[in-house]
C-alpha cells in the first residue's frame, strides 16, 4: 500500500524542480521556516540516491538565498530527522531550513546539539585543541549557571570535575609535578599520546567514582583533559580521553592509563 504524505497537499510551493519542492512549515519554529521535500516518498535521507541529493541541495541553497533576501536572518539551522527515535513523525523525508535571528533564544550556543538539551549546555565551539584556558574560562564553558571562586570551591581547586548535568562526563585538570596528602603525582604523556594518571590519594578501587572511570566508554561519555606544566599557568586543552587500563593492585591512589583521542591532530 502506497504511503500518503501530508506534504503532497495543495499548499503553495515556493520552489520546485524535477527532484523535489519547497514549502513553508505548517508549524514554524521561526519566521521563514521551510521544508525541502523530494517528490518520491521515502522515509530517510540515507535512502536518497545521488540524483536526489544533488537536486535537494540545489533547492536548499536556492531557498537559503530566498530567505536571506526576504527576512534577512542572522543565521540558519539545517536539520533532518531520521527515524522515530530522532523525532521524525512524518515518514516522507524532508529537510528543515530554519532561519535564526539574534535574540530569538537566550543562549543559542550549541545549536543543533539542543536535540539533546543537556548537551546544548556545553559550548563546545569554544574549545580549541591546544588553546590555553584558565579554570574560570573552563567553568564558563561547562557550567555558566554556577558560581566560580578562584582558588577555592569545586571548580576553583579540584583536579577532577564531575559534570552534574551529564552523568559520566568529567573534566581532568592536571598539573605536572603536583602533590596532595604527601603523595607526589607522577603523570606523563608518551609519544603515542598515552597519559599516565593517578586519582586523588584517598581513592580506592572499590569507590563508585573510580569504578565509573574504569568503565568509562568514550562513545557515550566525555572526559576533557586540561593540562599545565606548573602551578599558576593556564591549562592547555588536549582533547578527549579513552580508557585503556588501570593497575588492579594499586590504590590510594589508583593508577590509570588513558589514550588522548585527539593526539594525532595536535
Image (cartoon, rainbow, N blue to C red):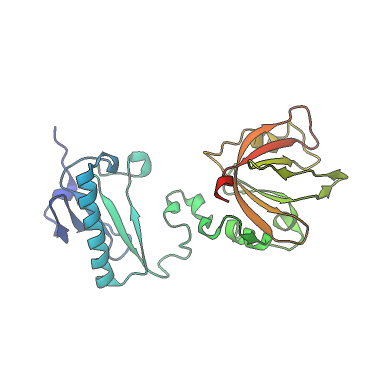
Residue 156 in view: yes
Left or right: where 33 falls relative to 134: left
Give the residue at the far top of this rendering. 249
Which residue is at 73% across, 44% downward? 188
Quadrant into which the N terminus falls = top left
| Pick the front one: 224 or 186 | 186
Residue 230 is left or right of residue 163, and the answer is: right
Kindly identify the residue that appears in the image at 56 percent across and 42 percent down.
221
Q: Residue sitting at 24 percent across and 71 percent down? A: 70
Q: Nearer the viewer, residue 89 or 50?
A: 50
Q: Is residue 210 above or below residue 103?
A: above
The answer to which quarter of the image holds residue 96 is bottom left
Quadrant of the image occupied by residue 49: top left
- Residue, x 55% and y 49% (percent of image)? 265
Q: Count the marks: how many? A: 0
Q: Nearer the viewer, residue 193 or 7?
A: 193
Q: Residue furthest front?
A: 191
State whether residue 26 appears in this view: no
Report x, y in % for residue 187: 75, 44
On screen, residue 70 versus residue 224, left or right, reads: left
Q: Position of residue 177 (x, y in %)?
A: 80, 49
Q: Position of residue 240 (x, y in %)?
A: 59, 46
Q: Quadrant of residue 93?
A: top left
Residue 5 location in percent, x, y?
Answer: 17, 44
Amino acid at each position: 500500500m502506497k504511503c500518503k504524505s501530508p506534504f503532497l497537499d495543495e499548499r503553495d510551493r515556493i520552489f520546485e524542480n524535477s527532484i523535489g519542492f519547497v514549502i513553508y512549515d505548517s508549524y514554524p519554529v521561526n519566521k521563514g521556516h521551510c521544508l525541502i521535500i523530494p517528490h518520491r516518498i521515502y522515509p530517510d535521507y540515507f535512502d536518497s540516491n545521488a540524483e536526489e541529493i544533488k537536486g535537494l541541495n540545489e533547492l536548499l541553497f536556492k531557498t537559503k538565498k530566498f530567505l536571506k533576501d526576504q527576512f534577512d536572518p542572522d543565521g540558519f539551522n539545517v536539520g533532518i530527522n531520521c527515524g522515530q527515535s530522532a523525532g521524525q513523525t512524518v515518514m516522507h523525508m524532508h529537510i528543515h531550513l530554519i532561519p535564526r535571528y539574534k535574540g530569538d533564544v537566550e543562549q543559542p550556543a550549541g545549536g543543533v546539539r539542543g536535540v539533546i538539551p543537556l548537551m546544548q549546555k556545553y559550548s563546545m565551539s569554544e574549545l580549541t585543541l591546544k588553546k590555553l584556558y584558565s579554570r574560570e574560562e573552563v567553568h564558563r564553558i561547562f557550567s555558566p549557571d554556577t558560581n566560580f571562586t578562584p582558588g577555592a570551591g569545586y571548580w576553583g581547586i579540584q583536579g577532577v570535575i564531575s559534570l552534574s548535568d551529564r552523568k559520566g562526563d568529567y573534566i581532568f585538570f592536571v598539573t605536572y609535578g603536583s602533590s596532595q596528602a604527601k603523595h607526589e603525582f607522577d603523570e606523563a604523556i608518551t609519544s603515542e599520546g598515552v597519559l599516565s594518571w593517578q586519582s586523588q590519594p584517598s581513592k580506592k578501587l572499590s569507590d563508585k567514582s573510580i569504578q565509573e572511570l574504569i568503565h568509562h566508554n568514550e562513545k557515550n561519555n566525555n572526559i576533557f583533559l586540561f593540562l599545565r606544566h606548573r602551578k599558576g599557568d593556564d591549562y592547555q586543552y588536549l582533547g578527549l580521553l579513552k580508557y585503556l587500563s588501570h593497575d588492579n593492585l594499586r590504590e590510594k591512589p589508583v593508577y590509570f592509563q588513558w589514550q588522548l583521542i585527539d593526539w594525532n591532530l595536535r
